[in-house]
Amino acid sequence: MNKEYSRAVKIRGKRKRKIFMFKSVFLTTAVLAALAALNTAATAADAPKMENYTEVVPGTSIKIDMIAIPGGKAKIGATAEEEGRGEYDLDQEDVEIKPFYMSKTEITWSQFTPWVFNNELQVQLTKEVKKKENVNGICRPSSPYGTIARGLGDSRNHPAFGMTLFCAQKYCEWLSQKTGKKYRLPTEAEWEYAARAGATTPYYWGESADDAGDYAWFIDNSDFTTQLVGKKKPNKFGLYDMLGNVAEWVQPKTPDQEWAILRGGHWESESTSIRCASRDEEAEEWNDMDPNIPKSIWWLASANWCGIRLVCEPGDAKAEEKKAE
């Protein structure tokens, strides 16, 4: 009896220890989960709240409305069956995008020409044509061939166009120097994520091109010229003219990418070429009409549809807002 009693006591003891260990593990897990939740909540509370803002560029008349774009996951690119799919369109892929700010409209002449004609800046030199890396934000472009707007919409609120990717990047560099923030071109993924604004259809307004006239300027309604920005309906993020009017430069994926990329179609595009996945590659003939030798690194004489839309990263924008307070 004593041996059996002793064995029973040991069994009960082991069971109690197992129960105690289970409770300990459960409590530890629960505590860690609670702490993690508190830490996540604290991080979220500490994270700067993104709000739309207007950039006022010091020493200039330039004002640029910037829209806060929330981060998230999305599917970008075109399906093989998508009507109007072009030869340069990308296959579908899932992307995850961090929050960022994007300019409400395409950059206009009023926002672009103060840099182009800034007499305080050094004009791009001949030697720098051959060595583009020597050109920085303290330089401005050489004069464009002919009139800057080429008779295709030159008012203050028409979109600026005709600049090369290099020119667009240097404008961003100059703007960054003037404001102390990091302005740049969007990546392709950021651009399409922002254009879609949650839409999974070919157009950010739906499946069909039938309603394109309400949202975009293209060959059917542009009167063969650029149009004033912000006159059509915006997408759900509040961005205007993401499709049509002028196509928009995006960042190269790699430094040695052979051809620059434009997104969104333009005023000469068919309705099926202003889809969210629409994509075009720069071609040599875009500068055929440039009489200069070597040809300009700033302007594309035969491309009247290349425009700019800006991105600013949240930390940069918030830091400057605090300084101004």
Image (spheres, rainbow, N blue to C red):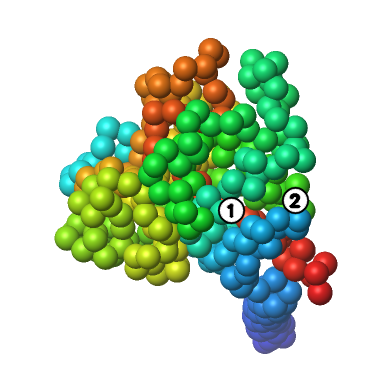
SS for dot 1: helix
Give the answer, above or below, for where 69 lies relative to 1.
above
Quadrant where the image shows the C terminus: bottom right
Where is residue 157? Give x, y as percent. 48, 58
Q: Is 271 left, or right, of 186 in this rendering?
A: left
In percent of the image, x 24 and y 61: which residue is there?
213
Among the 4 quarters of the image, the one containing residue 216: bottom left
Where is residue 46? Give x, y as percent. 73, 74
Q: Which residue is mark 2?
A: 178
Quadrant where the image shows the N terminus: bottom right
Q: Earlier in the sequence, mark 2 or mark 1?
A: 1
Where is residue 13? Give x, y as percent. 71, 81
Q: Which residue is mark 1?
A: 111
In percent of the image, x 75 and y 58: which residue is there?
58
Q: Is 139 left, or right, of 287 in this rendering?
A: right
SS for dot 2: helix
